Amino acid sequence: MFSNRYVRTIILSRVLLQLGIWIRNYAVLLYVTDLTNNNPVYVSLISVAEFAPIFLFGLIGGTFADRWRPKRTMVWSDLLSSLSVVAVLLTIMNGGWVALLIGSFVSASLSQFSQPSAMKLYKRHVPAEQLQGVMALSQTLVAVFMVLGPVIGTFIFIQFGINVSLILTAVLFLGSSLILSSLPRDAEEPKSGDASGFIKELTAGLRYIRFNQSLRTLSVTFSAVGLASGLTQPLQIFLVIEKLGQDKQFLQWLVMTNGAAMLAGGAAIMGIAKKVKPQLLLMVGLLVTAVCTIGIGASTMIWLTIVLLVISGLFYPCIQGGIQTLIVRNTEGAFIGRVSGAIMPIFMGMMVIGMFISGYLKDTFSLLAVYVVSGGLIIAGAISLLPLIVEKRRKAEKGSAS
């Protein structure tokens, strides 16, 4: 794989990009909690700024990535991300901090144009027999930074502060842009259709989901799980402070533990996925995650929280693997791209809603109450799969009887 120039270059640029993203995210999180005295509303707004662009621009970025030259799109996206961080740094130095949220939003939005372009270059320049290995390598890179990113980001912020963290982030984004600029010049892109093409494709995908029972069921499950994930995502730091009585820097160890468990769980799932039905894999993953979520919200003991995070991380790949397999198996080849493009924003949209209201719910009720609600939503998502499981069993029985 690494003999391929495109693979080497893109993976190296993604390393710099992931490192910059984690340094930025943790610098923003720790800086804002310092300034606002751990205000949960502002903490939840940080998560909204970082994740909302995936919902708002995921489909748009993918569509334009097909119309624009991929190398040029990636180079300019990373360059503009670097410049946006510099602009935020200048604002911080003049006494403002709300620009951190705007800068995080802009940078995350630009990445929605860069990522589909990388996929486009892989499709063009990586042989088919190597493509699956390259995609696995890309996913492993993300998992590795889920383990190392929080540690690196927290260490740099504690040792050097917000200014150095943002300067380093800008340099890493700029480095990614420069590395990508070494790729050969893009071929001329064929002219795409009119501007309404995106809306037509999205409408076709939604119509296809509407008349496909399995995809409708998965959409309901995705909605429940997305909302549940959004409720707890911004509040992890309060588990550390309020439940475990630790400094907020301790959050890096919890995230690292969960990320390492996900990595191990992903490797295990690869070995058993062919032997277990995807709908069963998904339901088991959801139920275990629901129990762990409620337990984590209630736990006041460090060792118990870590054990629950490990169990949750080990079973999280069951959810991702089950959903992706079900989408592929229940979607015609001509609709896979549009169905994925329509279902993922459902998940991200509900996740952003959950992030937006999580701080208010914590202030109104309690941290435990939010985690219990999150666990209940995941259980509801698992229950919504029952019609799909019953239908699959019925078809299997009919097939064996005939």
Image: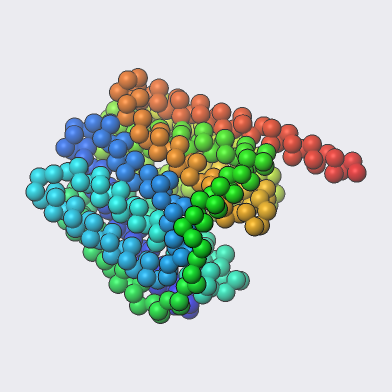
Q: How is the image coloured?
A: rainbow
Q: Is residue 51 left or right of residue 2?
A: left
Q: In the picture, residue 305 is in which quadrant?
A: top left
> Quadrant of the image for the C terminus?
top right
In this view, the residue in front, 42 or 331, is 331
Could you say where residue 293 lies in the image, as x and y percent from the top left? 46, 32
Tell me where residue 28 appears, x and y as whole percent: 24, 46
Taking the image as drawn, is residue 297 in sight?
A: yes
The image position of residue 193, as x and y in percent, is 51, 63
Determine whether, in the image, residue 90 is placed left or right of residue 362: left
Answer with the quarter of the image where residue 186 lies.
bottom left
Residue 29 horizontal side relative to residue 278, left or right: left
Q: What residue lies at 30% left-to-right and 23% top-to-bottom?
A: 363
Judge whether 363 appears above or below 274 on screen.
above
Residue 289 shows in the view: no
Question: Is residue 361 placed above or below 398 in the rendered structure?
Answer: above
Q: Position of residue 400 (x, y in %)?
A: 86, 43
Q: Report the residue that reaches farthest toward the right.
A: 402
Front residue (pair 133, 57):
57
* Identity of the residue drawn at 10% across and 50% down: 93
* Residue at 16% from the left image edge and 37% from the top image edge: 35
Is 197 or 181 nearer to us in this picture?
197
Q: Is residue 401 above or below residue 366?
A: below
> For the image shown, how many numbered marks are present on the structure?
0
Q: Is residue 323 left or right of residue 299?
A: right
